[in-house]
Amino acid sequence: MQIACKCKKCGHLFVQNEDDLCLEFDFYEETISYVCRNKNCKHENVLDFKSWKKKQEYSPLPQSRMM
């Protein structure tokens, strides 16, 4: 498994040296990404926490009421 981590402050990328999987925790861009290793696919799967946090700020949970 290959794990890549990018510093949020300076953008330096650390990569572990194996080649069966690449999982990137990008604290600079606030994403987690995985590139499919299937020869026919090569899809980049990305979880974007920056846009998710913005959505949560603009659409908070509804207020709860007690009866």
Image (cartoon, rainbow, N blue to C red):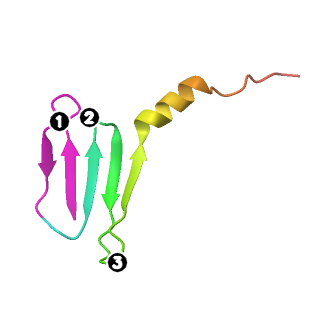
Q: Is residue 20 above or below residue 28?
A: below
Amino acid carrying label 1: it is Gly
Residue 6: give x, y in percent of width and height: 20, 41
Are the residues at dot 1 and dot 2 in contact (C-beta closer than 8 Å)? yes
Q: Is residue 18 left or right of residue 22?
A: left
Amino acid carrying label 2: it is Tyr
The residue at which mark 3 appears reads as 40
The residue at which mark 2 appears reads as 28
Earlier-in-chain disc, 2 versus 3: 2
Q: Is residue 63 left or right of residue 5?
A: right
State how far apart marks 3 and 1 are (Cα).
31 Å
Q: Dot 2 lies on which element?
A: loop
Graded by Cα atoms within 10 Å as few (under 14), some (14 to 19) or many (20 or more), the crowding at tag 2 reads some
Reply yes or no: does residue 6 show up in magenta.
Answer: yes
- Taking the spot 49% from the left edge, 36% from the top edge, the residue there is 52
State how far apart marks 1 and 2 are (Cα).
6 Å
Q: Dot 3 lies on which element?
A: loop
Q: Is residue 3 above or below residue 41?
A: above
Reply yes or no: does residue 18 show up in magenta.
Answer: no
Amino acid carrying label 3: it is Asn
Residue 48: give x, y in percent of width and height: 41, 42
Query: Image quadrant of residue 7?
Result: top left
Earlier-in-chain disc, 3 versus 1: 1
Front label number (3 vs 1)? 3
Q: Which residues are magenta?
A: 1-17
Graded by Cα atoms within 10 Å as few (under 14), some (14 to 19) or many (20 or more), the crowding at tag 3 reads few
Graded by Cα atoms within 10 Å as few (under 14), some (14 to 19) or many (20 or more), the crowding at tag 1 reads few
Residue 44: give x, y in percent of width and height: 35, 59
The residue at which mark 1 appears reads as 11
